[in-house]
Image (cartoon, rainbow, N blue to C red):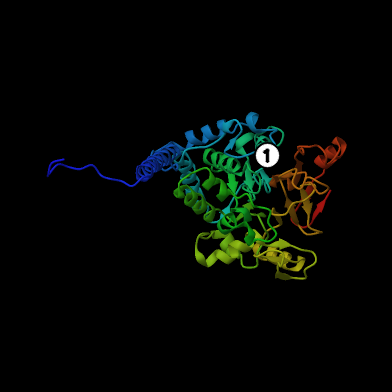
Amino acid sequence: MTEGTARPMECEPGHYELAARGFALRIDLEELMRTKEEEKRAEPAADNFEGKRLNEKAVAQKMIEELSSDRYLGLPIDHKSITDSGGQIFRPSADELKALCDSVMLRFKAEKGVARPKGRTMVVGDINGNINDLWRAIHAWLSDVVGKGPGQNIIFLGNIVGPSRRQFECLILVLAYKTLFPNQVWMLRGSHEEVPLNKDPKQDKNTTCYDTFYSYITGANYCKGVEEMFFALFDNMPNVGLIDDRILCVHGMITLELTKQLLQDGWDVAAKQYETMNKQLRWNVPSEQVEFCEPNSRRQYGNRLGPKAIKGAMERLGVEFVIRGSQMKRNGVKRIGDLPVVTIFSSSGVRKAVNSSLGALLFIDPEKNAIMPIFLVNIDDKIQTQEEFDEKLAAGWKIDNKEKTRQ
C-alpha cells in the first residue's frame, strides 16, 4: 500500500461482534422509543373544554334520554360507572357538563343557601348513587298517583353521590332535571358532596364512601377544570330547604348557629364565615341519648343534638317540622322519638344482610297538613311481604300547628 492511502481499521478479534451487538442494541432502543411514542399518541387526551356554547336545556334533555330508565332500571346498584364490558355507557363531553353546571350554578346562587319549595313536595333522602331508586323517585314525582307532574316540587336532601358506582350518572340526571325545571327541582348539599371527603374518604371514620365521585371524574380522563367545576358547584349548593315556610329540610340536622334572619334572607354559602354552620347542617345528628348538645365522637365533624336543643332551635326558627337525611333506616323512614323530626333514606338494598334498607320517599301536602311516606320496592324483595308493604304505604303522619303524631 502506497504512502497516503487509507488503511483499513484493524480490530482485535471479537471487536466486530461487539460493534454489531451495540448497533443492534441501538436499533432495539430506537424501536422501543418509537413504540412508546405511538402508544402515548394513541392514549385519549384529557377531555378539555372546547369553548362550545351549548343550549343547556337541549343538553339536559339529551342527558335524560341517554340515562333513560329503560336502560338502567334493574341493573345492580354497583354496576360499573363510565364503562362496562360492552364499552362506554355514559360519558358526556366537558362542554356538555359545563352547560349543565353553569345553568344550575346560577340557580344555586340565586337561592342564597335556602331552597324554598311552595306547595306539594316530594322529599328524597340519600340516593348514594343508586340510579334504580333515583328513577323510581323521579317516576313517583312525575306520576299522577302523587301529583300533577312537574307542577309539584321535588327536593333532594343531599348525598346524591355516594359509594355506588353509578353516582356520576345520578348527579348528572338530577342536574338535568334541575336545568329543565329550575323552580320545581331543589337540591341540598349532603356530607358526600364534601370536597375533602371526596378526595380522601378516610377523613370520616364512619363513612363507606370509598368509591368517590372525585375518583370517577379523574378516572374518566376529564381535565382538571371539570373536577374544579363540580366542586365549585358543591360549594354553592343550598344547605337547608324550607317548604311553605313551615317545614325545614336538611341533610344532617338543625344547628344552633342558624338564625331566623339567615333563614329568611339567605346567605352566601361559599363564604368562609359560614363554613362551620354549613358543615353542622350537613353533619349534625339528632340523639335521644343527649340532653342538649355534644360533639359527635363517631364522626370528624358535627354534633349530636338532644330533644331540648332541637325543640329550642325549632321554636327560635319558627318551623313546625324537620325532615332530614344522612342516616340509613331499615324501613327507609323513621320518626325521632316524639319529636316532630323524621329521617328519610331513599336508597334501598344498602347493607344487604339483616339490616338492609327499604328506601322511602316523603310526600308533603301543606294544604292538608299531611306527610305521607311512599316506600320504594327493594331490588331483591327480601325486606318485607306485599301485605307489609301495603300496610306501610297506607300509614302516614298527620301534622298540624300543635301536635305531630303518627296515625
Residue displayed at 27% across by 45% down: 10
Q: Is residue 257 left or right of residue 179?
A: right
Mark 1 secondary-structure assignment: helix
Q: Position of residue 380 (x, y in %)?
A: 78, 37
Q: Is residue 197 left or right of residue 341?
A: left
Residue 162 % position (x, y): 64, 49
Q: Image quadrant for the N terminus?
A: top left
Task: Name the residue at the top extreme.
Answer: 70
Task: Name the kind of residue labelled 1 in the image.
Answer: Ala
Q: From this viewpoint, which residue is outermost toward the left?
A: 3
Above or below residue 304? Residue 153 is above
Residue 224 versus residue 61 in the image, above or below: below
Residue matched to label 1: 137
Q: From the viewer's perspective, is 76 left or right of 17?
A: right
In the image, 364 versus 341, the foreground residue is 341
Q: Is residue 246 visible?
A: no
Residue 223 position in % (x across, y down): 45, 46
